[in-house]
């Protein structure tokens, strides 16, 4: 049996030789595809572990928001300085995102993930043995006691295996990080969807940090609670808002993913259109939640829940957009850049900006509890306009989606290496390309 025939049959064929059967892997060229499959139970375990890690991550991000009133009373800090705490916290967290994105595209993703979670959980453990002053530094790298050993459970599938129906390509040319960034910068679906994600992050960051205090002060204005003059400030609103966020988040993610799955059957632009529609609908809900808070607290809670539900519809869908428009070999870099841009321009700055506007408004008003509440309410209003801009960004994403998906799929199925390299580096086709 010839070498060419064995190659055409892939890695499943074997041929007897003078010394007995020989594996096709020994004679195949390095660029031949290799079969890859994953048992269903391992896929479920991997998804469960990653969900658990993300749950701890988001719990970690909003620890300060849950005790914000006590923090402000204890340290005697204004709204602007309180918002700055979250900005510094998230900015430190994001320093590692581009580094881990680079490593994830070039080395074992499971090993990279395990190393990152080991650092994360180690920082959390060390914070238990140091004073409150230095524990804040530890919080900058993520203070959670995550069960990092679970990171070893998920498999490490070959890049692009999903697009190739279980067959992974080996021997693909490796582009540099700068080439990856240039390719992503020219990928308009990625650019506009990243700006849309940034708007989402801006609003969710401001809500997650300030909404518990806003709802508490609304109760005080309605005469349902007494003002908090010293810690601890006993308020049920942090728990209520947290439970509301969890429930609407779970329902919203499932609803958005299922709607996208069904709508894609009749419209290839379904994903960005769903994101745009949900954000444009969330804007008036958030606006009404803020405006109605001094009048009727129940209506404010209802519209806030609807706004959070609509925001949550997008989290799974935007991940699908990124995976569909970016070639497999630089997806980790794309995810890292989207996370970095989204958080640096989004929820890293929105708590501080909201607090800064609130403090500026309070400076020119009488020092009464009602005026403090109205200052925070009015500083929140920018969120409704920002989320509407995010909806516009996803509408622009829909204009480029099919073109960028076609380019990514052409490279993902990878007929020729030179075409792969051209798409990643952004260079035009040369006469030598086959």
Image (tube, rainbow, N blue to C red):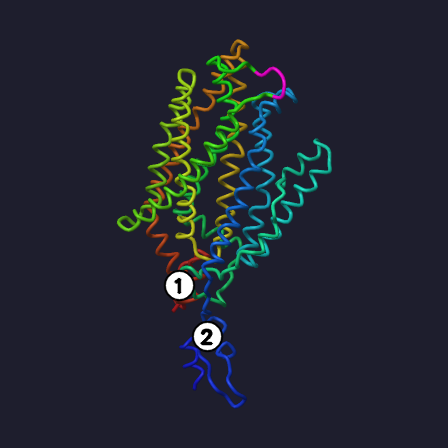
Q: Which is nearer the eye, 113 or 331?
A: 113
Tell me if 349 is positioned left or right of 390 in this view: right
Tell me if 131 is positioned left or right of 2 in this view: right
Q: Is residue 143 shown above or below 407?
A: above
Q: Of all residues shown, which one is farthest toward the bottom?
A: 18
Q: Is residue 266 shown above or below 419?
A: above
Q: Position of residue 291 (x, y in %)?
A: 40, 20
Image quarter in which the N terminus is found: bottom left
Residue drawn at x 54%, y 28% as measured from the top left: 352
Q: Is residue 37 shown above or below 66?
A: below
Mark 2 residue element: helix
Q: Residues within 10 Å of mark 2 (few under 14, many from 20)?
A: some
Q: Which is nearer the eye, 338 or 205?
A: 205
Mark 1 residue element: loop
Q: Position of residue 34 (x, y in %)?
A: 46, 69
Q: Of all residues shown, which one is farthest toward the left?
A: 266
Q: Position of residue 153 (x, y in %)?
A: 56, 56
Q: Of all residues shown, which one is farthest toward the right?
A: 130
Task: Check whether the beta carbons of the residues at disc 1 and disc 2 lie within 8 A of each other.
Answer: no
Tally of numbered discs: 2
* Residue placed under numbered mark 1 in the picture: 165
Q: Which mark is residue 228?
A: none
Q: Gap between marks 1 and 2, in whole Å?
A: 15 Å
Q: Residues within 10 Å of mark 1 (few under 14, many from 20)?
A: few
Tell me if 76 is positioned left or right of 51 in this view: right
Circle nearer the N terminus (1, 2): 2
* Residue placed under numbered mark 2 in the picture: 11
Span shown in magenta: 228-232
């Amino acid at each position: 049996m010839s070498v060419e025939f064995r190659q055409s049959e892939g890695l499943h064929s074997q041929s007897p030789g003078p010394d007995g059967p020989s594996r096709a892997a020994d004679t195949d060229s390095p660029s031949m595809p290799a079969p890859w499959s994953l048992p269903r139970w391992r896929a479920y375990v991997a998804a469960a572990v990653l969900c658990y890690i993300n749950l701890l991550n988001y719990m970690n991000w909003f620890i300060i928001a849950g005790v914000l009133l006590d923090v402000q009373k204890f340290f005697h800090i204004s709204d602007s300085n309180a918002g700055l705490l979250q900005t510094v916290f998230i900015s430190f967290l994001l320093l590692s995102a581009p580094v881990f994105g680079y490593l994830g595209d070039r080395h074992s993703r499971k090993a990279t993930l395990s190393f990152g979670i080991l650092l994360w959980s180690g920082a959390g453990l060390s914070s238990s043995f140091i004073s409150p002053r230095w524990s804040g530094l530890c919080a900058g790298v993520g203070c959670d006691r995550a069960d990092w050993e679970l990171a070893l459970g998920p498999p490490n599938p070959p890049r692009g295996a999903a697009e190739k129906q279980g067959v992974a390509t080996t021997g693909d040319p490796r582009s540099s990080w700068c080439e990856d960034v240039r390719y992503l910068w020219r990928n308009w679906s990625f650019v506009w969807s990243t700006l849309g994600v940034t708007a989402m992050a801006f609003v969710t960051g401001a809500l997650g940090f300030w909404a518990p205090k806003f709802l508490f002060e609304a109760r005080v204005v309605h005469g349902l609670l007494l003002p908090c003059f010293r810690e601890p400030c006993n308020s049920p609103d942090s728990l209520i808002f947290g439970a509301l966020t969890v429930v609407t988040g779970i329902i919203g993610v499932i609803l958005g993913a299922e709607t996208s799955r069904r709508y894609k059957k009749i419209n290839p632009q379904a994903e960005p259109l769903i994101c745009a529609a949900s954000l444009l609908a969330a804007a008036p809900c958030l606006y009404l939640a803020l405006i109605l808070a001094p009048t009727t607290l129940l209506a404010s809670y209802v519209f806030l829940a609807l706004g959070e539900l609509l925001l949550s519809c997008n989290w799974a869908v935007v991940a699908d957009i990124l995976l569909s428009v970016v070639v497999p070999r630089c997806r980790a870099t794309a995810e890292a850049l989207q996370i970095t841009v989204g958080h640096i321009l989004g929820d890293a700055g929105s708590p501080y900006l909201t607090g800064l506007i609130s403090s500026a408004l309070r400076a020119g008003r009488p020092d009464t509890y009602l005026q403090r509440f109205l200052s925070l309410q009015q500083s929140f209003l920018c969120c409704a306009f920002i989320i509407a801009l995010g909806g516009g960004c996803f509408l622009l994403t829909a204009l480029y989606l099919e073109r960028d998906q076609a380019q990514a799929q052409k490279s993902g199925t990878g007929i020729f290496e030179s075409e792969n390299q051209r798409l990643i580096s952004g260079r035009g086709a040369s006469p030598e390309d086959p």
